[in-house]
């Protein structure tokens, strides 16, 4: 094993110091909060001027190119906490909530009626069909009937008459703020300050998953015919049950040769790598008992400075590489050479 394992000092020379720009871009695409925070002022301005009618937001939306309809809808979904799962539940019980496919509601003391266009017959009501999932949200999309239905529901659902579910009564209140300059701003900005604080800790986890996905995609491209599984288990023999230890990446060649790849890519150093070190011997024994090889990808220099933990991992690995293009290529060569 030592023949394939560089020392911590050697890894420091090869390891990257910061998140790769490619993964940073992908993480930004996966995270919607920065986009919403950067466009909150435009969103606020649309609700501020929408004081002439309960659907005046459509005129304001059509008058600007800076706030596409799908982004406007995403703002409403996040601020009201009405996301994909709540919408699915609402869709399931929709005919019971709105038996005539219409919503009567009170706005500024007047009763209005909205006839839903698509929801009553829609096959699905998801982030994807509303163009508000991570990838589609970054592509401007015009207002569609299904999107309009959901926007009106989120804006005025709390003011609807009749036996309305608690989720609508409690969360769909934004329509009552339309045209109330100052109150809209206070509500939106306070909400996004809270969201920004509560999502800060998510970024390392997102980057960890993106790093794993990057390695998986590279292996799939370079090793056609192999089975590559992210977050998988292994079996010691063909008849035994999978063990209860989860591995980052489990790869099997067309001839069933096993390789396990553990990816250490964390912005916060120390604890995570120390946990890997504690598991290193157990995982190595399991992989070797199953006739496989265990490999570690150490992605950034914050990690390799944890000499004690890394030294333990080095002792219990068949191969260690840095998260660089050159080392990724050497990993593929190692896997092909050990079939």
Image (cartoon, rainbow, N blue to C red):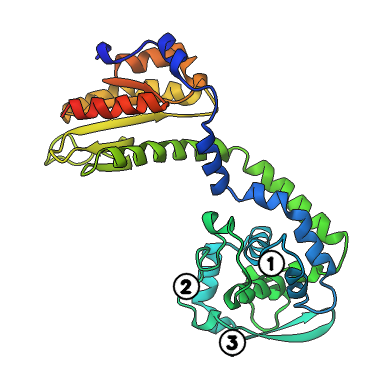
Alpha-carbon span between mark 2 and mark 1:
24 Å
In the image, which disc is placed on residue 100?
none
Give the labeled residue for mark 3.
Answer: 101
* Residue highlighted by disc 2: 124
Q: Position of residue 120 (x, y in %)?
A: 53, 83
Residue that mark 1 sits on: 170
Q: Are marks 3 and 2 in contact (CB under 8 Å)?
A: no
Vertical position of residue 180 compared to residue 311: above or below: below
Q: Does residue 13 appear in the picture of this structure?
A: yes
User: Could you tell whether 43 is left or right of 97 in the image?
Assistant: right
* Residue 64, percent from left and from top: 75, 65
Screen quadrant of the N terminus: top left
Q: Earlier in the sequence, mark 3 or mark 2?
A: 3
| Mark 2 residue element | loop
Observer-side mark, 3 or 2, equals 2
Residue depth check, mark 3 versus mark 1: number of the one nearer the observer? 3
- Specify whether residue 244 is in view: no
Percent position (x, y) of residue 126? 51, 66
| Disc 2 packing (10 Å; few <14; some 14–19; many ≥20) | some
Query: Distance from label 3 to label 1 (Cα)?
Result: 21 Å
Q: How many marks?
A: 3
Distance, label 3 to label 2, CA atoms, is: 16 Å
Asked whether the residues under the numbered discs 2 and 1 touch, taking CB atoms below 8 Å apart as contact, a structural biologist would say: no
Work out whether 185 lies above or below 69. Answer: above
Is residue 272 toward the left or the right of residue 332 in the image?
Answer: right
Give whichever of 63, 127 is nearer the camera.
63
Q: Residue at x 12, y 38 (%)?
A: 255
């Amino acid at each position: 094993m030592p023949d394939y394992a560089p020392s911590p000092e050697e890894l420091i020379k090869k390891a990257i110091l910061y998140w790769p720009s490619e993964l940073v871009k992908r993480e930004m695409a996966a995270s919607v909060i920065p986009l919403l925070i950067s466009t909150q002022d435009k969103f606020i301005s649309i609700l501020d001027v929408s004081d002439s009618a309960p659907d005046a937001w459509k005129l304001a939306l059509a008058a600007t190119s800076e706030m596409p309809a799908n982004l406007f809808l995403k703002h409403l979904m996040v601020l009201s906490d009405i996301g994909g799962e709540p919408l699915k539940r609402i869709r399931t019980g929709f005919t019971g909530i709105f038996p005539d496919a219409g919503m009567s509601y009170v706005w500024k003391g007047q009763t209005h009626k909205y006839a839903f266009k698509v929801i009553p017959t829609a096959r699905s009501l998801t982030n994807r069909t509303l163009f508000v999932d991570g990838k589609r949200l970054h592509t401007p999309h015009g207002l569609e009937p299904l999107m309009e239905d959901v926007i009106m529901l989120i804006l005025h659902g709390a003011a609807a008459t009749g036996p309305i579910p608690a989720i609508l009564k409690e969360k769909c209140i934004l329509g009552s703020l339309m045209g109330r300059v100052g109150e809209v701003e206070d509500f939106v900005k306070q909400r996004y300050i809270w969201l920004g604080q509560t999502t800060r800790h998510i970024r390392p986890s997102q980057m960890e998953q993106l790093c794993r996905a990057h390695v998986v995609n590279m292996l799939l491209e370079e090793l056609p015919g192999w089975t590559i599984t992210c977050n998988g288990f292994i079996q010691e023999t063909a008849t035994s049950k999978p063990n209860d230890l989860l591995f980052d990446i489990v790869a099997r060649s067309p001839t069933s040769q096993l390789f396990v790849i553990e990816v250490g890519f964390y912005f916060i150093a120390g604890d995570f790598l120390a946990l890997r070190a504690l598991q290193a011997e157990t995982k190595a024994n399991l992989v070797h008992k199953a006739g496989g090889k265990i490999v570690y990808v150490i992605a950034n220099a914050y990690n390799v400075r944890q000499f004690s933990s890394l030294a333990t991992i080095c002792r219990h690995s068949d191969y260690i590489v840095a998260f660089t293009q050159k080392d990724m290529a050497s990993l593929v060569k190692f896997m092909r050479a050990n079939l």
